[in-house]
Structures are given as structure tokens and as C-alpha cells.
Image (cartoon, helix red, strand yellow):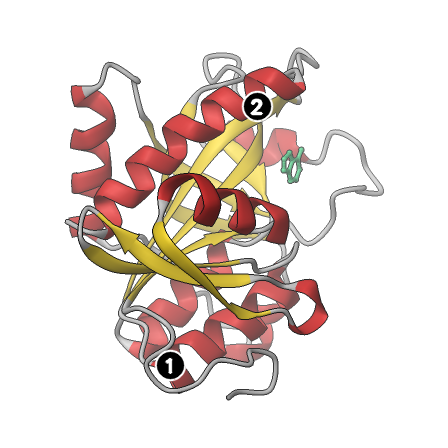
Amino acid sequence: MSVHIAAGPGDIAEAVLLPGDPLRAKFIAENFLENPKQYNEVRNMFGYTGTYRGKKISVQGTGMGIPSISIYVNELFRDYGVKRAIRVGTAGSIQEKIQVRDLVLAMSACTDSGTNAVRFGGRNFAPTADFGLLKTAYETAAARGWNPRTGPVVSSDMFYTETPDEWRLWARFGCLCVEMECAELYTLAAKYGREALCILTISDNLVNHEITTAEERQNTFTRMMEVALDTAVS
Ligand code: HPA
């Protein structure tokens, strides 16, 4: 039992998938896990544990944004001994060559969040993926012909920014897409000495304003889930 997760000791697996949307956690549990059991419904932030390819695995919603994911990941690492955390989410492309439906593996995460500025007293920490997970996810997706894109992403604190084309600065420095959680996940993994990876599907493109349909999002989401699950149990 932690402050925001009502699970008992041993209820959560060492490997956890982290979708932002709790209903996606439910979807993953119901469609990909064997014998899923719900361990959390506090604040409707659903969490489930089941098995995948014979291995125990959990899936926990995190909510949107760095403050929300920070609460759940702190508790998973600190109170439940989670060793491997894989975020599965959506992102907006900021590069012409990264198109909607593309799969992105975040090598590192830049951020405009104040979180690490406060945490490190104005010094800059470089939130980075676990190389082993990144390599496995890359090979898994490439073997299936899903052309994974790898590179730095941006974890933004604001979906609705004051300057609409703020993303152009990050794009000039080679960032691939914008999302809202990765930098905190990677920072906490470093703090606790755990493994983390962020796998993203491009849902919209800020360069050419292309968007995906609900059906496309569902199909590409399924691909992302397969990569995440195979990586989680590797
Ligand atoms: N900005 C931030 N987060 C996102 C976006 C975006 O454009 N698309 C999906 N997640």
C-alpha cells in the first residue's frame, strides 16, 4: 500500500508498462495479458498484473504530464521494487521525416519542465534510456519491419504553449517529437538505479498538421504494445 497505489506486497511485477491513459492500461490487461487482476483503482488510475509469455507483468496508468507520472513511478520504484519500467504513449512529431503512425524509441529526453531545474539546483541532468531495453526494443520492432525511429524527444510541461511554434527550437537541435512524461521517467530510473524506456507512437505532426484517425491510433497502438511487452519480458 502506497499513497496513490492500493496494491499489497508482491501484487506488482518487476516489469511494468506505463500508459498515460488508465483505460489503455485496462485495454492492455484485457487484450494482451493472461489472468489479469486489477490491483488499483485509486483515482481511477487503474493498475493490473497478469502474465505475458509466461512471465509476470504489470500495467499501470500514469496520467498526463511530469507531476502525475512522477508520483506513480516514485511509488513503483520505491515502494514496490519495480526494476523495469516501459512507458507506452503518443507524441507529436516535430520533424518532417517523422510521420504519423511512426514508432519512436526515446534515446534521451530534453525538457522545459522545472522539475529537474529544482531537483539539480539549476544544473542540467541528461535523462537517458536504458541501453539494453533500447537495443531490445529496436531489434524487436526492426525484425517485424516496423521501422523504429530513435533519437532525443522533448518532454514538455504544456500541451497548450503560449508560443505556438516553440517546438521549432527543439526541432533545430534534432529532437524528434514532443510528449509530456519521458524526462521524469528516465530521471527517476537513474535515481533508483532501475531500467526505463519510453516507446512512442506519433499521433499528430506539428510540422504539417497531419493527424491520425481513431482506428489508426488503435492499430499502431497494438504494434507499440507488442514491442513493449516483448521488451519487458526479454
Ligand atoms: N504535444 C505534447 N504531447 C503530445 C502531443 C503534442 O503535440 N501529441 C501527443 N502528445
Where residue 90 sits: x, y (%)? 55, 36
- Distance of label 2 from label 1 (alpha carbons): 31 Å
Residue 121 seen in this snapshot: no
Is the residue indicated by label 1 positioned so its CB lies within 8 Å of ligand 1?
A: no
Identified at 48% across, 30% down, the residue is 221
| Label ID, residue 217 | 2
Where residue 85 sits: x, y (%)? 35, 60
As drawn, 95 above or below 110: above
Q: Residues within 10 Å of mark 1 (few under 14, many from 20)?
A: many
Identified at 69% across, 64% down, the residue is 44
Left or right: 69 in relation to 229:
right
As drawn, 42 above or below 223: below
Is the residue indicated by label 2 positioned so its CB lies within 8 Å of ligand 1?
A: no
Give the SS element for disc 1: helix
Q: Quadrant of residue 82?
A: bottom left
Where residue 11 sits: x, y (%)? 38, 76
Q: Nearer the viewer, residue 160 or 117?
A: 160
Q: Splitting the image into four quadrants, where does ligand 1 fall?
A: top right
Residue 96 seen in this snapshot: yes
Left or right: 17 in relation to 1:
left
The amino acid pointed to by label 1 is: Tyr
Q: Nearer the viewer, residue 217 or 125?
A: 217
The amino acid pointed to by label 2 is: Arg
Q: Residue furthest right?
A: 162
As drawn, 190 above or below 134: below
Identified at 59% across, 25% down, the residue is 203
Identified at 46% across, 13% down, the residue is 97
Q: Residue furthest front?
A: 35
| Label ID, residue 80 | 1
